[in-house]
Amino acid sequence: MGREKKLVGEAGEAAAVRFLKKRGYRILETNARTIFGEIDIVARKDGFTIFVEVRSRSTSSLGPPYLSITKTKERHIIKNALAFLKWRKAVGSCWRIDVVSVKLDRNSKVENIELFENAVEDNGGRY
């Protein structure tokens, strides 16, 4: 990953944490590792464990950040969430996957931030 892309990602994740805290999310972990990769943010709110995928961009040429989530990425996020729950012995608990879309300007200042609750659903598929 290029240095600029990494900085955009880090700035976007920091903005997402602040944004979620203001909305009553209790942040449990950031950059949580599983055997399948990394979960950007793990939080709790209203009895749910919430896995948050943060998508950040500093340009509009490819559209809003949330459009970068493909079906393949959705399956990857679900696999990570299920692995996290299994590791924490929380299988069967209430959980969901939210997406925070962060548009930054050239100075890494937030231009727009959006929350999509329950944006990725596990429809009982095999992952």
Image: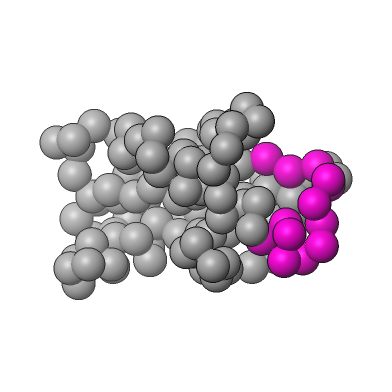
The N terminus is located in which quarter?
bottom left
Residue 31 painted magenta: no
Residue lying at 24% horizontally and 32% vertically, measured from the top left: 63
Name the residue at the left extreme: 61
Magenta span: 84-96
Residue lying at 51% horizontally and 53% vertically, measured from the top left: 16
Q: Is residue 112 above or below residue 31?
A: above
Residue 73 pos. (x, y %): 40, 43
The C terminus is located in which quarter?
top right
Residue 69 pos. (x, y %): 37, 38
Q: Quadrant of residue 107?
A: bottom left
Answer whether residue 52 is visible to the viewer in this image: no
**Horizontal side of residue 22 vs 115, given as left or right:** right
78 or 31: which is nearer to us?
A: 78
Residue 33 pos. (x, y %): 55, 70
92 or 118: which is nearer to us?
A: 92
**Horizontal side of residue 111 vs 121, given as left or right:** left
96 or 76: which is nearer to us?
A: 76
Answer whether residue 40 is visible to the viewer in this image: yes
Q: Is residue 2 above or below residue 73?
A: below
Residue lying at 81% horizontally and 42% vertically, measured from the top left: 94
Question: What kind of colouring is applied to the model shown?
Answer: one colour
